[in-house]
Image (cartoon, helix red, strand yellow):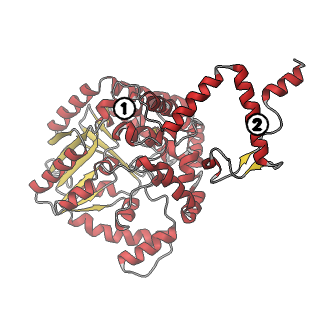
Amino acid sequence: MEIKSMHFKSRAAAQLANTGLQSTLKKVKGKFVDKRRDAIADYAGQGGDFEDLREAGREVRNRVLADLDLWLEMFESKATARGATVLWAKDDAEACRIIVDIAKKHGVKKATKSKSMVSEEAGLNRALEAAGIQPVETDLGEYILQINDNEAPSHIIAPVVHKSKEEISDLFARVHKKPRLTDIGEMTREAREVLRSHFLSADMGISGGNFIVAETGSVAIVTNEGNGRMVTTVPKVHVVLTGIEKVVPTLEDLTLLLRLLPRSATGQSISNYVSVLTGIRGAGDLDGPEHMYYVLVDNGRSNILGSEFNAMLCCIRCGACMNHCPVYQTVGGHAYGWVYPGPMGSVLTPLYVGIENALDLPHAATLCNQCGVACPVKIPLPELLRTLREQQVERNLRPLGERLALKAWAWVAARPALYHLGTRFAVRYLNWLAGGKKSIPVLGAAPEWTSGRDFPAPQGRTFRELYAKRSGK
Ligand code: SF4
């Protein structure tokens, strides 16, 4: 697993200095937020209460996690009874090995793929290529990234949200070797033509799974482009690659979560294509795979189960938390350095790759709780971020200077007279730095604070001084 998250600060600084990216982020800023808000209003117009739906979604996900092993066992037996093979991968390397082995067993030369974040986690495309198998991404966003030198997605449901139409237009002209198009509809048709030939010539289809259903042994896949259906039904082999936490007990639970997911993600009442696939092609079926495999990946999930971060396993990968996050909106997804960006990524990445390997991420949030309020399954993201910060302190993982400064502050704060003296000194020092102006361009002791903005000068005296004056004490 490739880890870059140690460097969030420098990556974020680079994204802030990228004027093209900043202009694209400004254009998309708030779009998903507005769509979600409108979808919730529509739902209320139909007599629905979105808060009730969120509560019910949280209950389903918690019920799953309370007996995860039992639901997974039930899923395995039901899926097997319908002709599928269920395989378990303890980590990303094992997931890749299993899928490469399946491909070799069936003589696969080309595999079409529909969107799967677990595939990104595992680096599956690299493993397939190393084994001489051509992976072809068929989600339009993922396809664009793949033909752009296998660029990483920057959002879990809109992987190419960081790219402008003009950039994609140039890319298509260069890679497709066709005249440059500027109309989005025409560009999409051109990509569809390219992808169609891959759909028809692939020996294997690899999909993610938004959910897997224990009572029927099915996988549910939602897409807006229909590529999921082509990937899962045309080739003779279908592999579902998903995380062990994606199981839901019943079809009824599934329908509940399918009402929450698109409204929270794209503001749709339902995704354009909802596929519930159960087992291999039956006698008389016109399509469907002859062989179906589930590769259910742990990759650190069972370590989270039952821990203080258990709630994170409720995540249904809707992206609402990042859409509402002021940090994500400003720096984009690539600053986070690994597969999952935004608040959910700032919790998940340290848990998956090790807290010591992603020290910056729990601090890449203002704790404003926009994410917690938007999350359809009520994951308390700010609380989890705070717990990660606490664990960093407990394990002495914060930089020495920061630890000493906090110790000094705590010592002073416990001594009111000294604290009073200290704040008086600090206010006078800051006023001296401001030199009579309203802001401080360079903060002497902590110049990092002012590298991208001015620091406001103190407005007069300290709170204690003002209080004393006004109360006459
Ligand atoms: S944490 Fe919540 S809001 Fe964020 S992706 Fe997961 S379910 Fe959606």
Asked which secondary structure carries label 2, the reply is helix
Q: What amino acid is labelled 1 in the image?
A: Glu
In percent of width and height, residue 466 lies at: 84, 28
Q: Local crowd at mark 2 within 10 Å, few (<14), some, or many (≥20)?
A: some
Crowding at dot 1, Cα within 10 Å, few <14 / some 14-19 / many 20+, comes out as: few
Three-letter residue code for mark 2: Val
Residue 101's place in the image compared with 396, above or below, is below
At 81% from the left edge and 39% from the top edge, which residue is drawn?
Answer: 459
Query: Which disc is residue 427 wearing?
Result: 2
- Asked whether 251 or 97 is in front, the reply is 97
Position of residue 181 measured from the top left corner of the image (x, y, whole percent): 47, 77
- Percent across and percent down for residue 199 are 26, 64
Residue 250: image location, x then y, percent: 32, 31
The residue indicated by pointer 1 is: 252
Of residues 10 and 441, the one nearer the viewer is 441
What's the residue at 29%, 31% (across, down)?
302
- The secondary structure type at the circle numbered 1 is helix
